[in-house]
Amino acid sequence: MEEETQLTCSFVTKLPTELRIPEAPLAIPAKTSRLGLSQVVNQLLALDRPRPFDFLLDGELVRQSLESLVLAHGVSTESVLNIEYILAVAPPKQSPPCQENDWVSAVACLKSALRLSGSYDGSIRVWDGDGACLSITPAHKGGVNVIRPLPTSSSASAPPLLVSAGKDQKARLWTGPPQDAPASHGAHHSATRLTNGSASAQQDTLQAVAVYGGHTDAVQCAAVNPVGSRLATGGWDSHLFLWPTGAEVAASALDGSAAAPVKPSSAARKKRKGEAGSAPAAAIAEPASQAELQGHLQCVSGLAWPSDGTLYSCSWDHQVKRWDTETTACVDTLSGGRALYCIAAAPEDQQVVAFGGADRALRLWDLRVRHGEKQATQSFVSHQNWIVDIAWSPASPHHLLTASHDKTLKLWDKRTSIPLHTLQGHTDKVLCCCWLNGQSVLSGGADNLLQSWVLGQ
Amino acid sequence: MKRRVPSGAAKAAIEPIPEDSDAALDTGSLKLSSSDSEVSSYPSDEVASDISFESSEEEVPDAPVPEAAAAAAAASDQDELDRAVLDYVVASQQVAESSASPEEARTAAAQPSPRADSDAEQEGDTSDEERPQRNTVGDVPLQWYRDEDHIGYDREGQKLIREVQKKDRLDALIQRNDDESAWRTLYDEYNDEELTLSKEELQMVQRIREGQFPHIEVNPYEPEAEWYSKDREIHPLSGAPEPKRRFVPSKWEEKRIVKLVRALRKGWIKRDRTPKMDEAPAYMLWQDDGMVADRPSSGLAYVPAPKPQLPGHDESFNPPKEFLLSEEEAAARRMQAEENGDPAPWMPASFDALRRVPLYSDFIKERFERCLDLYLAPRARRMRLHIPSPEALLPQLPKPRDLQPFPTTILLKFLGHTGKVRSVAPDHSGQWLASGGDDGLLRVWEVRSGRCMRSWDLQAPIHCVAWCPNPSLRLLSAASASRLVLVPSGTGTQEVERGAAEALEEACSQSALAASDESRPMCSWQRLLQHEGAAELVHLHPVRQIAWHGRGDYFASVAPTGNTQAVLVHQLSKGATQNPFQRNRGRVTNVLFHPVRPFLFVATQNSIRIYDLARQALANRLLGGSGVIASMAVHPSGDHVIVGSADKRLAWYDMDLSTKPYRALHYHSAALRSVAFHPTYPLFASASDDATVHIFHGMVYQDLLTNPLIVPVKILRGHRQHEHEGVLSCSFHPQQPWIFAAGADGEIALFGN
C-alpha cells in the first residue's frame, strides 16, 4: 500500500469563539479537499448540527486537494500550513417570484426593504417584502434602464431618494415612500395589494423631483457617489455627465424655489404636465450638468462610484476607465477585446472592479497591480452567455453576483474562480440583479419575473 | 596645305600692333572684309574650319587685298588667319549680343562678318544701340580716312571722331605693358575701338587653329538617317514596282556561265575530284569505343527484327486459279493449324475487284481514323508537374486566430417573426435592429437584450428594410409589395419623432403639388394612415430593395419588374422622385450608392454598371458570372465591391484592377442571398441558402501595390433551411465585430466574438 502524504496544518479563524478550534498543527492527508477539511473541523468542534466551512490558503479558497494547492502555490510540504476557515455560503433559497407585465430591466432596493423594479413598459414598481406591488409609476417612456437608490440621509424621517434612467434620454430623481412605509402599509396590506401590477391609487408613492435632460440618446447607466450628492449618467450618445443630486435638489424642488444650481424651467413644467398629469403640483427641478467626462467613443454602458473622487465607467468601445471626478480627468484605462455592459466596484477596497460584457467571462481588474507586474485582470468563466449585470455584495468585499443571458445568476467569491452558487429560476434571459441588505438578492429578467433569493450561512 | 600653328604663335599673331607700328598701321588698315572675300569663296557650312586651315600662300595674292600684301612685309597667311579670326570673333560677339539662342548665333557666326553686320543693321538696331559709334562708311578703303580726325560717320551722319588711335604711342605702349589683357586685345580700325578677347573666344581661336570646329557643340558626326538600305521594308520609301531585271535571268550571268561551261568542256578548268590515294585515310580514333562489335555498350544485343516475308501470289486478291484451294485442301490446312496450335491460316480467295475484298470497306475508314489520330494526337510530351506536397499548392494565408476579432459564436436570437425574415438592418449607433419579413411586420429590436421594441404591420411581405443614415431623423424605410414605407422609428425622443413625421408630411405635400401637373406619376408620396407619422411611396411595380445615400436625403428603390422604371431615385427633403435610367439593360436586381463618390452601382442580372451621377455617364462596368446577382456591397473605402450571385459564387472586384473579379470564392453549397462589409473591421460576410454565413477577413491595404488579403475565417451555422431557403439577409453591427443573420426559419441570430 502506498504511503499517504501527510501535511501539517493549523486551523485559524476569525469566527466567534464557539466555532474556534485549537490552533495546534494537525497532520492531514494531502488528498483532502474542502469537504474533508470541513469534516475535520466539524469533528473537532463537535457541533450537534454540522456546519459547512470554507477554507482559505494564502487568500485562495480551497477548491481542490491540498496537495495540488500546495504544489500550485509552491509552498513546502514540510512547513506548517496556516489554513483559515470561514463559514461557507449555503445554497440560496428561492422566494416566490413577483409577476410583472413586461421584461424587468432594472431592480433596486431601498433601506426599508422595499423593492423597486423598472421594466420595459416604462414604469417603476414598488414591491414590499412579501411580493405585493405597492405602486406603479410611469417613469421612462420606452423602458427603464437603471434604478439606483441614493444613500439614506441622516434624518430618518426624510423620504428615501432614488434615481432612474431610461430610454427616453432622461434620468430622474424620485422621492420614495417614507421609511416607515411598510409598517404603515402593513395594516391595510391585503386591501392595497396589487396583483400583476394594475394601477391604483398608490401610484404616487414615487414622486419625481428632478429630471436630468442632457443626453441625446438613451441613458444606459447611472451611479451615485457614496455621499449621495452627485450623480453620473452615461448613455448611448457616448456622453458621461455629472449632475448634482441628493437631498438639496429634492428639497429645492419640493420647495418650488429656484435654488442656485437648480433651475426649474417652465419648459420642464410643461413637459412634466404633458407626461404625468396625475402628479401633484410639486415642481420638478431641472439641474444643469456639472461636468462632462470625455473619453468614451461609444455607448457608456456601466458606471460604478465606490469612493467620492473615483468613478469607473465601462463602454461598448471595449474600455474601462477610471475618472477623477474632481478634475474630470481620465486617470486609468483598461482595454479589453469585447464590448462591455456592466461594472461594479468593491465597496471596501475601491481598487478592485468587476466588469462583464459581450463575453462569457467575469473579469476583475485590480488597480493596485501595476501593469506588467502580474496579471492585472482575472477572468472567471462559468456563464454560458453575456454577463449583463454585476452587483457587489454590500456585506462582504469578496462576494459578487452576476446576471447573465444564460437564464442564471451566479454568486462568486473573488478568491476562487469557481462560482459559489448558480441561481436558477428564471426561464428567460436575466437582465438585472441587485443585493438586498447583503443577505438576499433580487433579479429580474425577460420572463417578466422578479425573483429573489435568500442566502443562508 | 594644312598647317598647324602652335598656340604660342597664336599669341604672337594676335597682337600684331606692338611689333612694328607701321606694320600695325598697315595691318590695321586692312579692310576687314578682306578675309571675308576669302571666306565667302568656301562652302558656307564649313566656313570656320576652312578659314583657318585652307588659307594658303597661293591664295593670298588672289585675295582682293593688295594693300595687305604690300604693306605688311610679314603679312603672311598667318596674319590673314588672324584677321579672319578677328573678323570671326567680332562677328560672333555682335551676333551673340543681338541674338538670343546659341544655334542662331552659330549660324550667324558662320556668315561672313560684314554681311552679318549689315544684316544685323537691317534687321534691327539692337546691336546699334549697344555700339552707338558704329561706322557707316561702308566698303571703302579705310586709308581714305587715315589722315582725318574722324573714321567715318554714324547713322545720323555725324562724324565719328578717332579717339583710340589718336593716343600717344608711348602712352599706349606703357598702357599695354601695364595691362595684363593687352596680349589679347585687338584694335578694330573700322570702328576705332579695342576689343578684348574673352577666354571663350580665345578657346574658339585655339580650336580654329587646331583644325576643329569653333564651337564645341558642333557634332560633325551626327547619326545620319539611312533612307536607303538593303533590308526589305514593310513600308518602302518608294512605291515603284519591282523592276523587270529582278525577274528575267541575267544576260551577263548567262554569258559568264556559257564561258565557264565551255572552259570545263574544253578541259581548261580542271576539277580535282579524285582523292589522293597514296595517303592513308584519316580514321576516327575513338569511334568504336562505345561499341563492342555490333552491340551497344549496354551489353544488350541488338537483334534486328526479321524482315516480313513479301506477299506472294497466293495473297493477291485475285490469285491465279492454281493458288486457290479446294475445300479439302482448305480443311486440311485448317486442321493442321489447329493441331499445331497456330492461328488461323491464310486462305487464298479470289475477288473480281479490290473493292469486293471484305476488308476494303473498313480499310478506308480505318486509314482515315489512323490519320485522324496522328493529326489530333498531342505532339508535346506531357510533363508531370513536380509538386513536393499538396500543401505547397495552397496559398500562404495567415491563421484565422491571428485575425481576430470576428464573429464566432451565436450570442442572441431575436424571436418573434412568424414568417421568413427577409431583411435586417442595424441602425447607425448599433443600439437598434430593424427587420422585416414575410409576416408583413416591420420590427425594431433592442440589440443588447433582444427585445422587440416596436412593430408595424404593413400587411404585405417586406423584402427590404433600411435605416435613413441621417441620425437626426431616425427614419426607417421598408419595401413591402409595391409600397415603400417610411416610418419614424420611435427610437429617439418625441421631438425627433415629430421632426421625422413633419419631414415626411412636408415631402408628401410637396410631392402632391408637383404631381398635380403630371398625368401618370412613377410614384406617389402619400401619408400612411394606419401608422402615425408614416408615409408611403406607392410604386407601379413591386419594390424589392432600398438603398440610401450616405447623407440620408436621397434613396433609391428597385422594382425588378419595372423595366424602364426599375430604378427610381427619391429625394426625401423635396418629396421628389426621378427616374435616372430611361432604359435598363437587363433586369435590375440591386442598386447601391458609393460611400464617398457620387456613383451609383446598378446590378443587373449578370453585370454591374457604375454610373457617375455628377457627370451622368457610365463610369465602369463589372462583369458578373453565370448566376443572377443577388446582392452586392461596397467596401467603406469605395474601391472594392463584393457580389454574391445565385451560382454559389462570391466575387470580390477590385475596381482599380479589372472589371473581372479579383477573387471568386466558391465556398457555399447553395445560392448566395446576401453579402455585407463591416464598416470598421476588415471583415465581410456572405449568407447563403445552405443556412450558413461565411465570415471572411478582407484586409484592404492603403498602398496601391498590395492586393487585398482575403482569408475565410469562420462558418456560422445557426439557422435551419426552410423551403430550400437558408439565411436571407446578413448585416454587420456598425461598431462591434458582430453580425446579424436573418433566416427563412423566422429567426434572427446575432453572432459575435
Image (cartoon, coloured by chain):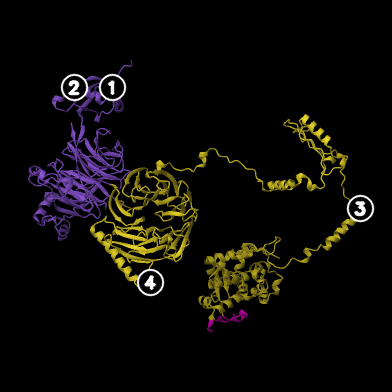
Chain colours: A purple, B yellow
User: How many other residues sit within 10 Å of disc 2, few (<14), some (14-19) or many (≥20)?
Assistant: few
> Depth check: A363 or A276 in front?
A276
Mark 2 and mark 1 on one chain: yes
As drawn, B116 above or below B254:
below
Mark 4 and mark 2 on one chain: no
As drawn, B389 above or below B709:
above
Q: Residue at x 57, y 40 (%)?
A: B386
Query: On the image, numbered disc 2 is attached to which residue?
Result: A23
Can the viewer see residue A105? yes
* Circle 1: element type: loop
> Distance from label 3 to label 2 (Cα)?
144 Å
Chain holding disc 4: B
> Distance from label 3 to label 4 (Cα)?
113 Å
Q: At label 3, which amino acid type do we have? A: Gly
Query: On the image, numbered disc 3 is attached to which residue?
Result: B267
Q: Residue at x 30, y 56 (%)?
A: B457
Query: On the image, numbered disc 1 is attached to which residue?
Result: A30
Magenta-highlighted residues: B136-159
Can the viewer see residue A414? no
* Circle 4: element type: loop
> Depth check: B136 or B108 in front?
B108
